[in-house]
Image (cartoon, grey):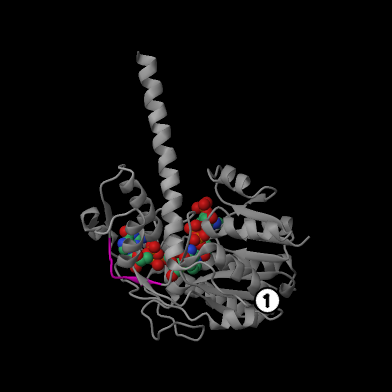
Amino acid sequence: MPHALITGITGQDGLYLGELLINKGYEVFGLVRGQSNPKVAMVEKTLPGVQLLEGDLTDLPSLIGAVEIAQPDEVYNLGAISFVGLSWRQAELTGETTGIGVLRMLEAIRIVASDEMGGIRFYQASSSEMFGKVRETPQRETTPFHPRSPYGVAKTFGHYITVNYRESYGAHAVSGILFNHESPRRGVEFVTRKISRGVARIALGAQEKIALGNLEARRDWGFAGDYVDAMWRMLQRDTADDYVVATGETHSVRELLDTAFSHVGIDDWSPYIVQDPRFLRPAEVDVLVGDASKARDLLGWRPAVDFRTLVEMMVDADLTAVRSDLDREDATLRGDAAQRA
Ligand code: NAP
Ligand code: G4F
């Protein structure tokens, strides 16, 4: 039974990857930070049999301890401060976690593996944010980086230190340059989920408006469940390399609004959207679209879920969740009224 250690197991990708690896027969270990992380129960329910280990990407000894206990064949480094907007407000923490955290994870492997680094395969969750102010379209593995946020800068460090450990120490270290990927498990701070949840609440009468920033930004949005399969495929290759993972299509936030609102029968969404300067960024990534032909040719990877299906899946999941929240609130109100009567 191969062992895998996943940092960021409480996040969107950690959960999908954990499911994929358990289904493939792996023993899965997950790094969880904090002394009482509220997501532990949810992770244990979603990933039966997972073994959770204490650790933090800002604390090297805890990473060494996790690698010693897990004895992993594969390490997937998904942990990060991943919200670009937050990275300007907490730039130092972002650098420590999203950037230097990669170096600490690689060092933990090097120390435990006693310089035989190649024996533990390493996946780094790199990002299309590294392309930033894009130098060519579509973006591919050879496109130069021009990051536009502290997050993008930290990811660029993480990418290059991964390449450097491959070249310096013979680490089997892979960098997956993934474009935006979403799902019903996406955090509510990201634009896709903010919109799918807002649309569901508006359709059910629980909210009046959604406040958004730049509606013209364009992203290459895919489904997270498809993308974790690409991560696993990368680590199965005998040679460590870098791969772009993307759908090859780009859509604006406006198109996202069109698709989400039309799914609940609303054709004109303008009365429901307010533009709020708080959600504009100091420097924007205007357009991203990836060329995943290397992943297609060498990994046999292709996305299965298209943009419309993804958005509709997210709105449907939020309709179900919001309905059940509203039912619970109703039941509580009825219970309170019955007690008063
Ligand atoms: P996510 O849902 O925000 O999950 C981030 C994870 O990082 C959480 O489990 C979080 O733990 C953990 N984390 C944060 N700080 C940590 C620390 N100091 N030590 C250990 N763990 C820490 O992100 P995601 O969407 O699953 O993305 C996974 C990875 O892929 C991230 O590195 C992200 O930057 C990268 N990426 C994502 C996309 C995308 O579109 N989703 C695209 C390219 C790259 P808590 O739950 O305790 O906060
Ligand atoms: O959903 P977002 O916050 O994702 P962003 O910045 O593209 O970052 C995500 O994808 C990266 C891969 O390219 C990952 F590395 C990163 O970890 C994260 O998963 O914003 C998408 C776009 C931006 O241009 C933003 O300005 O949507 C625009 N936007 C407009 N209004 C908004 C909003 N974004 C958010 N979060 N909230 C808004 O109200």
Indicate whether 60 appears above or below 244.
Answer: above
> Which residue shows up at 65% across the image and 72% down it?
233
Residue 270: image location, x then y, percent: 22, 58
Q: Secondary structure at mark 1?
A: loop
> Which residue shows up at 40% across the image and 80% down it?
146
Residue at numbered disc 1: 171
Q: Is residue 3 left or right of residue 205?
A: right
Q: Is residue 216 magenta?
A: yes
Q: Is residue 338 visible?
A: yes
Image quarter for ligand 2 equals bottom left
Foreground pick, 38 / 181: 181
Residue 289: image location, x then y, percent: 42, 77
Q: Is residue 60 visible?
A: no
> Which residue shows up at 52% across the image and 79% down it?
292
Foreground pick, 133 / 307: 307
- Picture quarter with the C terminus: top left
Residue 170: image location, x then y, percent: 69, 80
Q: Residue furthest top?
A: 341
| Part of the protein shown in magenta | 213-219
Q: Is residue 259 magenta?
A: no
